[in-house]
Amino acid sequence: MQIDRIDLNPLGGIAGDMFAAALFDAFPGQYTAFQNDLALLGVKGLAADLQDRQSKGMRAGHFSVTQDTQSKPPRTLRAVQEFLGNTPLAPEVIETACAIYKLLAGAEAAVHGKTLETIHFHEVSDWDSMVDILAAAGLIARLNCRQWRIGPLPLGGGTINTAHGSIMLPAPATTELLAGFEWIDDGVSGERVTPTGAAIVAFLKPVSLQSAAPAATQLCSGSGCGTRELADRANVLRATAYTRVGGDNLQQDQVLQLAFEIDDMTGEELANALDRLRRNDGVLDVCSVAVMAKKSRMATGVRILAAAHAGPEIIKQCFIESSTLGVRYQRLDRFLVRRDIDNIDGLPVKLAHRPDNRLTAKAESDHLADTALPERRERAAHAEQLALKSQQARHDD
């Protein structure tokens, strides 16, 4: 059955082992697939165990790794990519694991003033962390969930000893990875969100657990606990999976809408600025409208849709690219139809699955920009028809 949504409730926090334990607890069959992945990793003496434990009277799964090997784990992003790429793991598992590692490397590089090529992993460079990431990657790839949601992340506090000495909590790499996410200070100190857990969350790009969600049927639920006992609460992460009622092809996510007005830039300056903003990763759309601003001046109202996790960086770019002195923002829930991309003779065609089960197609106009209008329309119509036929044939099979 299609998993439309998985909700993560980080009461105790989130780490790589807690994420794996919660999902294995919810989907026991996935643990067998993970054991196969672990064997394909090809490292003798590396093993994992999944047990039931109690945390403040609550039963939860506990995922742990044991290592009795002389093999040294890879310590750079390139070494990790080469190591995983040389295994017979499924391509989607390798791709997901490498993407999580790349996020970790990017955060560590930003914290230490290095590059992706020169940064070395420290605390996340052991086999324990690689197995946690492998487990998470396999779960994410095989479950193929359409949407993830997460509750506020517990802030924790204090310090922890690392290869770079004592550092404050949350760890710098954790805060780098989770810029734009919602945090809560529940008064419990310690490391509540680890860099590995943060990288998994950053990869999933979940929306807030408080965002609106369509009607759904609960499929299953599981809990994963950490190794530490907290004073006043269970140290668990709960994962609950749902499937949509009715299967109407609608998906939901959460975006940021940024807004500001400009009355002191020329048309040429503003057009160039908006083009540069559109090129930023995380920007979904940029539009402008004529407005009557303060002092009855004609101005341009700028509206930007951005991925929720990218908000802080895009806001900074608004101040860099324009003369605005303030940017408003709000989080918006939105619904989208399910979409696929088909490539017809080098021309991408977007296929939209409508709620009434109709399928519509639209060729990407940017790829036809240099084509004369009559030929452009003919090529687009031909590609759209072929894409619809191809999709229907796959559905019939």
Image (spheres, grey):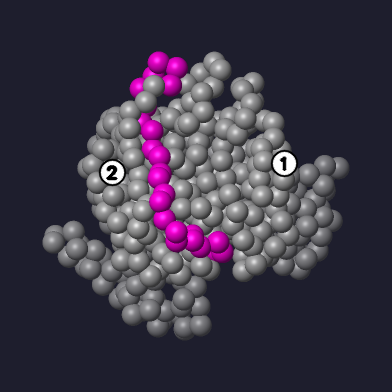
Q: Is residue 270 above or below residue 159?
A: below
User: Which quarter of the image is occupied by the C terminus?
Assistant: bottom left
Q: Please state if 103 lies on the left or on the right of 91 as rendered.
A: right
Instruction: Tell me, yes or no, if residue 9 can be seen here.
Output: no
Q: Which mark is residue 31?
A: 2
Question: Considering depth in this image, is 165 or 61 the residue closer to the camera?
Answer: 165
Q: Secondary structure at mark 2?
A: helix
Pick whichever, 86 or 292, lies toward us: 86
Q: Start and end of the magenta stretch?
A: 55-77
Distance (Cα) linking label 1 and label 2 = 36 Å
- Residue lying at 56% horizontally and 37% vertically, measured from the top left: 193
The picture quadrant where one finds residue 218 is: top left
Percent position (x, y) of residue 196? 52, 46
* Residue 166 marker: 1
Q: Quadrant of the N terminus?
A: top left
Give above or below for 307 relative to 23: below
Q: Residue at x 40, y 45 (%)?
A: 66
